[in-house]
Structure formats: C-alpha cells, structure tokens
Image (spheres, coloured by chain):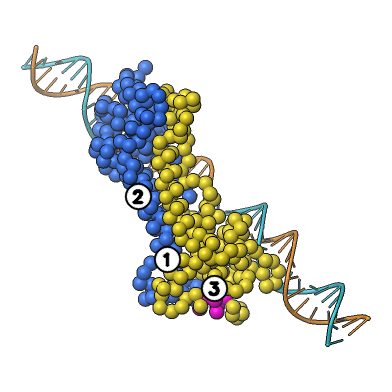
Chain colours: A blue, B yellow, C orange, D cyan
Amino acid sequence: MRLSGGVESALHCCVALTAADGPVPAARLAELHGVSATYLAKHLQALSRAGLMHSVQGKAGGYVLTRSPEEITVLDVVEAIEGPRSTFVCTEIRQRGPLAVSPDDCTVSCVIARTMTAADRAWRAALREVSIADLRSAVGEDHGVDVLARIGDWLRSPLP
Amino acid sequence: MRLSGGVESALHCCVALTAADGPVPAARLAELHGVSATYLAKHLQALSRAGLMHSVQGKAGGYVLTRSPEEITVLDVVEAIEGPRSTFVCTEIRQRGPLAVSPDDCTVSCVIARTMTAADRAWRAALREVSIADLRSAVGEDHGVDVLARIGDWLRSPLP
DNA sequence: GGATTCTTACTCGGATATCGCATGTCCGAGTCGCCGTGG
DNA sequence: CCACGGCGACTCGGACATGCGATATCCGAGTAAGAATCC
C-alpha cells in the first residue's frame, strides 16, 4: 500500500499557490517543483474537479485556490487525488466457503472491516487536522530564508 | 491507495487458527474461506517469515500460531503482508527546481512528510490496539451461532 | 481618441501509450506418518 | 511383541505468468489578451 506520488506534488502546489496573487499555469508549477508538467496537469485537474481550485483559461490563465488556505485541509487534497474510497474493501469472506454464515446473520459488518475502517478514520482525522495554512507557516519556520516570499517573487517574475 | 486483499485473508486465517488445536494446511484454510489456495499460501509464507506463525512440514503439517492470540496485533499481520514501510515516501521536492533549498538548510524533514508520517502513525496505532483475541471474541458476539466452535469442528473433521 | 473586431498565442481538458506492482499459478525440495519386515 | 528401515504421500518454499492501476504523454477545444482597424 503506497500513497500516490501525485499527492506530494499536489500539496506542494497548494502551498505555492498561497504565495501567488493570481492564476498560475500548470507548467509553471511543474517547473518550480521539478516534476513532469503533463503529469502534474492531471492531478491539478483532479483538484479542480474536487472544487479545491478553479481554473481560468486563456492567455494569463492558470489555477487559483477557491478557498482560503485555512479552509483547505490536507485530507481534502488527499481525497481529491486518491478518491474518497476507504483503503480497505471487505469482500465478505465470512459469507464464503463451506461454513458461510447466511446474510441474515450479518446484521453488523465484519469485525475485521470495522477494525480496518476505524484505523482508516484515524488516519483521515489526522490529515483533517492540518490545513494548507498550517503547512505554509511551518515551511516558513523550517528554513532560515523566507521560502514562501522567494516562491511568490519567482511566480510573479516573467519567463526568461 | 488500496490495501492488499491478502490482508483480509490473512486476518481471517489467524482467527481461524485460534480455533484449531494443531497444524492446519494452507489448502484447508483456503477452502474454509473460499479463496485461491496457491495465492493464500503466498501470504501465509509472509506471515511465517514475519514470525507470527511457524510451519510444520510433512504429512500432518500446516501452520500454527507462534504466540497467543492476545500477543498478535492486527498491525503485526498488516505489516507482515504489506511490509513495514510507510504509506508515504517523500521525494524531497523542496530540493528540486529553480528554487531548490540546499541540503544544509534541511535540518528537519519536510512538513508534508511530517504530516503524512504522523497520520501513518495514527493509522498504525489504531491497528496496534486490536489483537487477534479481540477479533475472535467479537466474531463470537456478532453472530448468534458460535462460529468459532463450528470452525474448530470443521478443521478437526477429516476430509471427505 | 475610443470602440470594435480579428488574430493569436496560451490555457486547460480528456483521450491515449507505457510501466511496475499486486495478483494468481506452477512445480520442486523437504519431511513426517505409516506399513512392512525382521529380530 | 517390539524396533527398525523404507516407502509414499503430503507439506511448504521459492520461481514463474498475467492483469490492472498508477505513471507519463500527447493533441484538440476553448478563451482571454492584445494588436489592428475603423468610426
């Protein structure tokens, strides 16, 4: 079970968009982070479909966050990329084989499914506690130089 | 991100082995649960390598739990199947692109990595709280009939 | 000078190849139980 | 009757195909900015 690598890119993009004051094209974000442009575009589209950012087309277009960074959680981004489905899918093994229990006796879901789902909820709860704004401020504190300001300047500067 | 389907089988097998009083062959467990025998064998080998159960060869061989059900957590089983590596792998995006921060300024790991790792720990902590013994007792309470006793009888009964 | 139209270049969006890992399967090595044999 | 040796069948273990989803890419539809034109 490995998380899609697109999640990391998407989160970095969200933080970077915090420093921008206008639409930023996907290609620009890809260059900033040193990742494949066309592939990043795919994930940005997913974020757009999820309503976290909206796209503006045309010459000076790009992506813009729809909500304030405080209102976007890491979980929002993860679910936009990975889909909202749980990490565990119960195949109802208890209803198979020679000792299958009848569906009538399955008033509650399988214990194993309950356990895995509870863990899944704990994971999601932890991700819900952190917002993009939290990430942004932490990035500023982690490094001596003001990384966010540099990113903002770079995004505003014209292409060579 | 989807959890391997083998985890579900492996957990059911651990609970079933609780009801047995001797080695149970992989083929028997597969028939009991209605899953592919050869594929289940693969996962049982993983559990064996992890030290959760040990195999005895020969005519009346099979798998036996090495520890008491109270001492085996669901996390043990999940990590045996999925591997102990975290669900998130940081590719150090911050050190790439035109605004890459130098490795010297990376005294702490990336905020995003920290966040995802914390969520991963929460997930694992939830799984560590539940033991195979907990699963067994819950199975007994979920259904009217004593499922575990039926499984034990079936495992003891000779093949047709 | 100002409004309008046209061009143009830039943007996103979905449809399309490629790769890696999980899934699913197979056959060989090893081992224990059982049966026959001999004392 | 008991001990021993050989046989046989059953077990696990690692090596081998296959399918599907994540990865990576491309080209077309749409649009806003800007230049050129006309009033």
Q: Quadrant of residue C15?
A: top left
Against B58, residue A55 (above or below) is above
Write down the residue under mark 3.
B19
Three-letter amino acid code at the position of disc 3: Ala
Whether label 2 touches label 1, CB < 8 Å: no
Which labelled disc corresponds to residue A125? 2
Q: Secondary structure at mark 1?
A: helix
Q: Provide the secondary structure element on which disc 2 rests.
A: helix
Question: Residue type at mark 1?
Answer: Val
Q: Residues under labels 2 and 3: Cα distance?
A: 35 Å
Q: Are marks 2 and 1 on the same chain?
A: yes
User: Please, is residue A31 above or below residue B91 in the view?
Assistant: above
**Is residue B4 shown left or right of residue D32?**
right
Of A24 and A86, which appears nearest the observer? A86
Q: Which residue is rendered at x = 34% and y = 26% of the image? A: A148
Q: Is B140 drawn above or below residue A131 in the view shown?
A: below
Q: What chain is tagged by disc 3?
A: B
